[in-house]
């Protein structure tokens, strides 16, 4: 039977919008592996799973949502109402969590799913009119054992004004700037849209793939979550230029 990672998250997550104007990362539990985003529902930025074996693996994800009115309490109320709209869910506030983002609300949601009873922890923070949503899931029977692991990962979240501010390394900063400059040259010499240009073999083979290899090799000390989000951040920055 195929392992189920996060497919049920569509049942409990709100609609997620485009990335915010800052860079954020966290430390996943030790030994966990990056999950396949194609198997996830919604605009999840990154996800980690404990194991690729078994029917349902504990998992943790990071998402963002633009909040137009910027009211934290109103947003939390809407989140609770969203969960309450499904009578099979049970949602309760567990208080607040101390993180680098300041006031972080902690929720627990019990969800009935085809896999059985699922336990969900969610940590929700606000920054520049964005809700930052960390979601951790496991079978309900494993929730007590996983609780501290989830909370430690939630507490590790950190925000930077830009990607470059997250890694004080001149070589890295020059590589990013060189890639931006090369992209600008491709844009100026082409009349095709950015998505098509990004997939162009010339750009992929000569610029993007070597940059990916650089991040994987030279920035390994930053951890797999930072590496994954850094590449995502750079790609989105290119497509928006």
Image (spheres, helix red, strand yellow):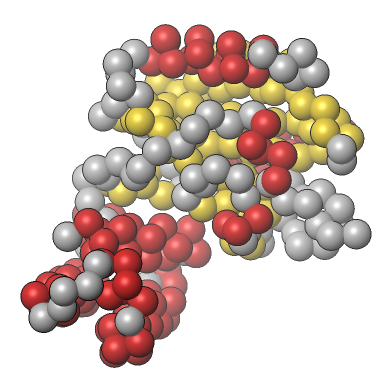
Residue 167 visible here: no
Across and down, in percent, residue 4 comes to 78, 52
Q: Quadrant of the C terminus?
A: bottom left
Residue 120 visible here: yes
Would residue 47 appear left or right of 24 to someone viewing this image? right
Q: Residue at x 28, y 83 (%)?
A: 203
Q: Residue at x 51, y 46 (%)?
A: 44
Residue 68 higher or lower than 215, as above or below: above
**Foreground residue among 24 and 155:** 24
Would residue 187 appear left or right of 106 to someone viewing this image? left
Would residue 173 appear left or right of 56 to someone viewing this image? left
Quarter location, residue 207: bottom left
Q: Residue at x 30, y 41 (%)?
A: 20
Residue 38 higher or lower than 213, as above or below: above
Residue 180 higher or lower than 111, as above or below: below
Across and down, in percent, residue 170 comes to 17, 72
């Amino acid at each position: 039977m195929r392992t189920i990672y996060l497919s049920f998250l569509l049942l409990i997550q709100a609609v997620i919008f485009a990335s915010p104007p800052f860079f954020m990362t966290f430390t996943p539990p030790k030994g966990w592996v990056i999950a396949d985003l194609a198997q996830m529902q919604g605009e999840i930025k990154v996800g980690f799973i404990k194991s690729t074996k078994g029917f349902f693996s504990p998992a943790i994800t990071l998402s963002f949502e633009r909040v137009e009115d910027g009211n934290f309490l109103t947003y939390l109320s809407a989140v609770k109402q969203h969960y309450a709209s499904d009578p099979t869910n049970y949602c309760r506030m567990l208080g607040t969590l101390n993180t680098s983002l300041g006031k972080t609300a902690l929720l627990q949601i019990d969800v009935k799913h085809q896999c059985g009873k699922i336990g969900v922890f969610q940590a929700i923070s606000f920054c520049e009119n964005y809700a930052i949503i960390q979601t951790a899931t496991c079978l309900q029977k494993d929730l007590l054992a996983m609780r501290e692991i989830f909370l430690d990962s939630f507490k590790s979240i950190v925000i930077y004004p830009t990607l470059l501010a997250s890694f004080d390394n001149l070589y890295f900063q020059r590589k990013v700037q060189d890639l931006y400059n090369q992209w600008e040259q491709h844009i100026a010499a082409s009349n095709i849209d950015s998505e098509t240009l990004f997939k162009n073999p010339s750009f992929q083979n000569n610029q993007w793939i070597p940059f990916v290899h650089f991040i994987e090799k030279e920035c390994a000390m930053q951890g797999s979550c930072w590496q994954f989000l850094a590449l995502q951040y750079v790609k989105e920055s290119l497509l928006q230029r």
